Image: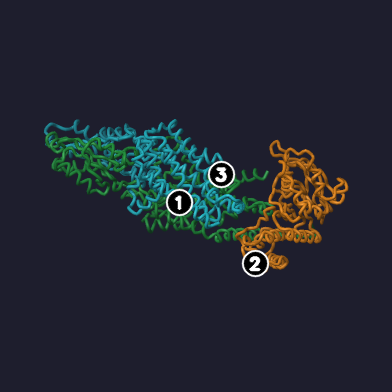
Chain colours: A orange, B cyan, C green
Amino acid sequence: MNKVIQVEGLTKMFGDFTAVDAITFDVKKGEIFGFLGANGAGKTTAMKMLIGISNPTSGKATVAGFDVYTHAEDIKKNIGYMSQKFALYDDLTVKENITFFGGIYGLSRKRIKEKSEALIKELGLEKVASQLVGSLPLGWKQKLSFSVALIHDPKIVFLDEPTGGVDPITRRQFWEMIYKAANQGTTVFVTTHYMDEAEYCDRVSIMVNGKIEALDTPKKLKEQFQAESMNDVFLKLARSPSPALPKGKGVNVGENYNNGTKSSPLGS
Amino acid sequence: MLPIIFVLPLLQLVILSNAATFEVKNIKFGYIDNDHSSTSRALIEKFNASTYFDVLTDFPSEAKASSAMLKGEIDVVLEIPRHFARDLQKEKHSSLGVTINAIDGAAAGVENVYITQIIQSYNKNIRTDLAQISDAQIQPVIIDAIPLFWYNETLNYKTFMVPGILVLLVTMITLFLSGMNIVREKEIGTLEQINVTPIKKSQFIIGKLFPFWVIGMGLLTVGLILARLIFNVPMLGSLALMYVYTSIYILVVLGIGLFISNFTDTQQQAMFIAWFFVVIFILMSGLFTPIESMPKWAQIITEFNPIKYYVEVMRMVMLKGSGFKDILPQLIKTLVYAIVMNGLAVWSYKKTI
Amino acid sequence: MAQNPPLWGVRGAFMKRFIGFIKKEFYHIFRDRRSLFILFGMPIAQILLFGFAITNEINNVDIAILDHSKDNTTEEIINKIAASKYFSIKQMITREADIASVFQKGQVKAVLNFEKDFGRNLIKDHKATIQIITDATDPNTANTITNYLNAILQQYQKELNKDITIAYQIIPQTRMVYNPELKSVYMFVPGVMTIILMLVSAMMTSISITREKELGTMEILLVSPLKPFQVIIGKVIPYIFLSIINAVVIVMLSIFIFNMPVQGSLILLGLESVLFIITSLALGILISTISATQQTAMMISLMGLMLPVILLSGFIFPISSMPMPLQIISNIIPAKWFIIILKAIMLKGVGMQFIWKETLILLGMTVFFIALSVKKYRIRLE
C-alpha cells in the first residue's frame, strides 16, 4: 500500500458552479505533497472532500485505504488536520488544549500525559503551558496547532494554508517540523499559495479554476515550463484566461517571491 | 441576515399585534344543574346567549366539573342548587354557586363582572315576572354610570398595540445590530485594522452606526405603512414630528448598543447584556401592563427606560394627535439621553482601544 | 494498518472522550466570567424586578373630576374614590373643554363627569347620571378603569339602598379558586420563569455552537473521529446543568419571595422543567444548524423568539381571547405548554394524569427539533 491517497475524476459542484473539476492524482506514503493554487482555485474544497467533511459530487477517492463515500469515519481516525485558522481554543490553556484534542482522538490518559509533556518540551512551551492560548503569539499557536494535529500519530496530516500570517523565521521552523514528521513516515498533504514553500515539497500539483493543470516535482515543473522558480511556473499557468478569478486578488505570488519576507495579509 | 432584519419584525408586527388584548371573551363555561326547573334552564339560557361565554358544558356532578377545571377545560362553573326555583318563589331569594379559576386574577375579575351583570339582568326579569304590586316598596336609587371611551370608542386594542409593537421592533433591531457590531470586529480582529487607518474615531463610529440608523428609520416607515394599510391605525398628529422624534430616539438606542459593545469582549457577552436590558425595557415600558400600577420604586426605574418615552410619544402623536408642545417633555428627556449615551459610548470607545 | 493499533477502538474510550469534551465546555463557561455572571445574575434580577413590577392590576391611576353639581353626594362619592387605592385624584377641572386637554397632555387616564344637580336628582327622581370618560387609547386599561369605577359607584348605591330589601333575586356566591386574592404575581411568575429559561437555553446553545463554527474549531471537531451528534450532545450537557441551576433558583425565589405555592409535587415540577430546558436547548441546536455566524444565531433566537414567547404563550395576554388563527399558532409555542404545566402543578396541585397531554406535546417538539437539526446538519456537510 504505497499510495495513501488515490483520487480519480473527483468533482464537486455547487449548483452550476464547478468548484473542483475532475481532478486525478495520488500521493505516496511519506511524501510531502504540495497542493497549490490561487485563492478560490478549489484547493480547500478538494481537501474537504478528502478529509470527509464534504461529499463529492462524482469521482473516486480513497484516503489511507478508505473510500471517502462509504468510510469517512474510518478516514477521520487515520488523519490529522490543521486548518488555516490554527483553530485552538483561545480560552483554554496550552495543556488543556492538548488534553482535549488527545481526548477526542481517544488517547489514554497516560498517553496524553506523555505526549503533552514531550510536546511542550519539544516546542519550548514549558513557561506558558498553563497560559491561555489566546495570549500566545501567532507563530506559537501555529506550531502548537500542528503538533496537536499529529497527537494521535495519524498516517496522513492535512495542512490547509498553515503558514498564513506568520513571520519567515517561524515559517522556516514550521517547515522543519513538517520535514521531521515526514521523515517519521507521516504523509503530509499541504495547501499553500506561497510559491517559495512549493519548492520545499516533494511533489506539487497546481490547481487553476478547479482543474489540476500541472503535477510533478518542483524541479521537473520548472524544466517543463522553462521557468526559474515555482513562482514563474505559477504565473505562466495563472496567466491563461481565468474568468473566475478577480484580478489582483487571486495571486499574490509576485510580491511574496520578490521579497520573501513579507507575509500575505490575504487569507483565502 | 436581511430577512431577519426586515421580514421577521414586520411579520411579527402584523401577526402579534392581534394577540395583545386583555379582553376576556370565549370564556370556557360549565354548569351543574341540580334543580332542572324552567327557572334554572332560563338562567343557563341567559349565559348561553351571552357572547362572552363560549363552551357550555353540562356536568352531572361537582366532581366531574372540578376535574374538568383541573384539566383546564373550563374556567367558570355555575352550580345551581336543588330547590333553586322553589326558594326563589317562597323565600324570595335564592343562592347560586359560582366558581372561577382565578390564576389569571385580572381575567377572573372581569369574568366575575360579566357573571354579575347577567345575573342582575336576570333578577330584573324575574322581578317583573313575579313581583306583585304589594311588593313594591320604596323605590331604590340608581346611579346611572355611562362609560365613554374617548379616542377609541370601540375599544379596538390593535390601534393601541400596533404603534407599541412597532416601537419594540425598531428598538430591538437597532440595539442588537449596533450592540454586536463593534464587538464582532473586535472578536474577528478587524478593529485593529481600522485603528491603524487615518480615519478619526468619531468618523468611524458615525460610519458604523449610520447604516443602523437608516435601517431603523426604514423599519419605522414600512411599519407605519403596514399599520395604516392593515390595521387602519389613524395618524392624527404630524408625521414629521414622529420622524423627528424617532431620529433622536434611534440615536439613544445606538448609543446604548455601542456602549455595550465597548464594554464586552465577545458577541456572546454583548448579546446577553443587550437581551437583559431589552427584556426589562419591554416589560417595563407600559406597553403591555400599565406603569401606574407598578410600585413607586419600579416607576422610578421606568424613568430611565427610553422605550417608555417612545411608546408614549408614538401613541400620543398617532392616536391623540398631540403636537410638539405636548411631547416636549419626552423629547427633551430623549435628547438628553441621546447626548449622554453617545457621549459615554464615544468616551468608552476611546478608552478601550 | 496492522502495525498501527487503533487508539480509539475501545468502547470505554467513548465515555472518556465524551467526558473530556464536557470538561472543555465547562472551561469555556467558567473562563468567561462576565457571561457567567450575566447568566446567573440576570434571571434573578429579572424575576425580582418583574415579580414586583409587572401587574395588570390597577393602582393609583390618576383621574380628574368635573363636578357640575358640587353637593354633598358628589363630595361623598369623590371621597370614596380618593380613599380607594386604585385611584388618585390628580385635578379638578371646571370646563368640558378641559377634558380634551388633560387627555392630550397625558396627565390623567379618566375623567368623572357629574351632571348638574346630581344629588338633587338622586333624591327627587331616584336616579342621577354620571359619565365615566376614559382615555381609551389604551383600551385594556380604559376598560379596567371603567369596571373599577363602576364597582365603587355600585357599592355607594348599595349603601344608599341598604334599608330597602329587594325581593326576588338570585345572590351569587362566588368562589375564586387557585388564587383567591387575585394576585397577578401568580400569573406572571410562571411566565417570567418560562421566558428566562427558554431564551437563556436557546440563546446559549445556539451561540456556543455557532461560535465554534465561526472560530473554525468546529471543522477540526468534524474531522476528528467524534460523531457530529456527540459533538452536539457534549456541547449541550453543560448548559442543561446551568439551566437546571437557574430553574432551581427561580423556583426558590418564587416560593420564598413571592409566596407562590407549590401545591403539586416538587419532583414533577423539576422533571417538567428539565424537559422544557431540553426542548429549549434542542431549539437552540436547530437555530445553530441554520445559522453560520453568532450574529445570525443571536438575531434569530432573540428577534424570532422574544416577542412570540411574550405574546403568544399566555404569559400576559389570555390566549382564549385571541383571534382563532392566533390561537392555532400559539400551539407551536413550546412556552405556552410549559406555562400551562407550571400553573397546573404550582397552583392547581395536579399530578401527571392532568398534564400528560402537555408533557407529550413538549416531548414531541423536542424530538422534532432534534430530528430536524440532525437532518439540517447532514445537509450542511454535503
- Which residue is pictured at 75% across the width and 57% down the height? A154
Q: Which is closer to the viewer, label 1 or label 2?
A: 1
Residue C36 visible in this rendered orientation of the protein: yes
Residue B24 percent across, percent down from the top left: 35, 39
Location of mark 2 (residue): A128
Do the numbered discs 1 and 2 sit on residues whose CB atoms are within 8 Å? no
Amino acid, disc 3? Phe
Q: Is residue B334 above or below residue C98?
A: below
Q: Which mark is residue C123?
A: none
Residue C234 percent across, percent down from the top left: 60, 55
Apparent side of residue A183 relative to residue A93 in the rendered image (left or right): right
Do the numbered discs 2 and 3 sit on residues whose CB atoms are within 8 Å? no
Q: Is residue A200 above or below residue C289?
A: below
Location of mark 3 (residue): C368
Q: Looking at the rendering, which quadrant does residue B89 occupy? A: top left
Q: Is residue C150 above or below residue B256?
A: above
- Chain under disc 2: A
Distance in Å between CA atoms under marks 2 and 3: 46 Å
Discs 3 and 1 lie in a common subunit: no
- Chain under disc 1: B
Q: Kindly state the secondary structure of the residue where label 1 is placed.
A: helix
Do the numbered discs 3 and 1 sit on residues whose CB atoms are within 8 Å? no
Distance in Å between CA atoms under marks 3 and 1: 44 Å
Disc 3 crowd rating (10 Å Cα; few below 14, some 14-19, many 20+) is some
Location of mark 1 (residue): B341
